[in-house]
Image (cartoon, rainbow, N blue to C red):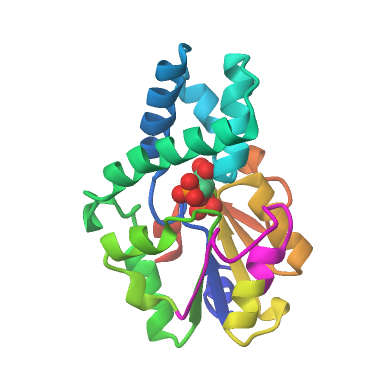
Amino acid sequence: MKERIRSYKGAIFDLDGVIVDTAKFHFLAWRELASQLGFVFTEEDNERLKGVSRVRSLEILLEIGGLQLADEEKIELADRKNKNYVEYISSIDESELLPGAKDYLLLLKAKGVSIALGSASKNADLILSKLNIRHMFDAIVDGNKVSKAKPDPEVFLLACAELGLKPDECVVYEDALAGIQAAVAAGMKTVGIGKPSHLPGADIVIAGLHELLL
Ligand code: B16
Ligand code: MG
């Protein structure tokens, strides 16, 4: 099974939770915003924001705080959180890569597999540059390029098209259920990263990319 997974012509990677754990920096920035707004935001709350767009994340946060705000205020708060978050990720480096991520990308490259990113983040380019792996991607499709959030298949279909491949030639690596659903809707093979009970519908579920090195 693992050998077959590594032999697909295209590999499309989600970013947060697959290549790097940016969720912890999102958490710090959202928690600070919640504190400024006068309520507590917990790590458990943060789980609900994984794989979710920035705007939708803010809406969930405001729901948790029991706040209803006008659209202009929401834009200001999302910007404020993002500036803080960007400050956190500006100081990351290769040491933040999740176990096996770089070696797995290198293994696929050596096999001639085309590699794409399919992430909801609008900061994906900056993060890939900081991790020193940007050059390994043949296509980068992020939150700046798509209008529909996962579970809509748009992000993965675009990534596949940018690689010049067909959906059934691609495998998606994803840690969020909505992302697995998006990949299934796109007609692609799926590798779930995390716990099998959290990722029904994935073709296989592994704890991390390091498991595919063997
Ligand atoms: P940004 P992924 C997602 O990344 C994160 O999991 C999610 O928590 C975040 O809200 C979203 O990116 C948008 O990020 O604020 O940087 O645009 O898992 O799709 O790689
Ligand atoms: Mg993710």
Name the side, left or right, on which 203 lies relative to 208: right
Residue at x-position 69% and y-position 62%: 183
The secondary structure making up most of the magenta span is loop
Q: Position of residue 125 (x, y in %)?
A: 39, 64
Q: Is residue 20 above or below residue 197?
A: below
Which portion, as a residue range, is magenta?
138-157
**Drawn side of residue 188 relative to residue 27, left or right:** right
Residue 161: quarter of image: bottom right
What's the residue at 48%, 56% (across, down)? 122
Of 202 and 44, which appears nearest the observer? 44
Q: Nearer the viewer, residue 67 or 6?
A: 67
- Pinpoint residue 157: horizontal percent, then vertical percent: 68, 72
The C terminus sits in image quarter: bottom left
The image quadrant of residue 106 is bottom left
User: 29 or 46: nearer the eye?
Assistant: 29
Residue 194 seen in the figure: no
For this view, does 47 lie left or right of residue 148? left
